[in-house]
Amino acid sequence: MTATKLVIIGGDAAGMSAAAQARRSAPNMEIVVFERSPYVSYAA
């Protein structure tokens, strides 16, 4: 069985919030976040 994968476009607050929610709901999920700028949000 293959692992579930999630790709998030945008590492701003909404993108990182979505990644955090996905991690909480499925700890084994592979999550990849693409961000154009060199900075991602980590204020959560």
Image (spheres, rainbow, N blue to C red):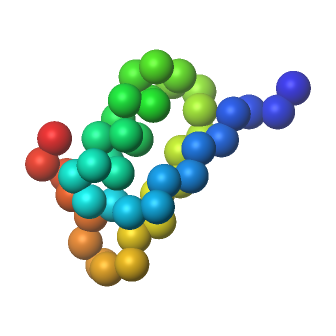
Compared to 36, does 44 lie above or below?
above
Work out which quarter of the rendered image holds the N terminus and state it. Answer: top right
Name the residue at the left extreme: 43
* Quadrant of the rendered image containing residue 28: top right
Label total for image? 0
Compared to 35, does 44 lie above or below?
above
Q: Where is residue 39 in the image (x, y as percent from the top left)?
A: 25, 72
Compared to 15, does 40 lie above or below?
below
| Residue at 26% in and 59% down | 12
| Residue at 46% in and 61% down | 9
| Residue at 44% in and 30% down | 23
Compared to 38, does 24 lie above or below?
above
* Quadrant of the rendered image containing residue 17: top left
Report the side of 5 relative to 22 (left or right). Answer: right
Q: Where is residue 5 in the image (x, y as percent from the top left)?
A: 65, 41
| Residue at 37% in and 29% down | 21
Name the residue at the right extreme: 1
Q: Position of residue 31 (x, y in %)?
A: 54, 45
Name the residue at the bottom extreme: 37
Q: Nearer the viewer, residue 24 or 14?
A: 14
Work out which quarter of the rendered image holds the C terminus and state it. Answer: top left
Report the side of 22 relative to 16 (left or right). Answer: right
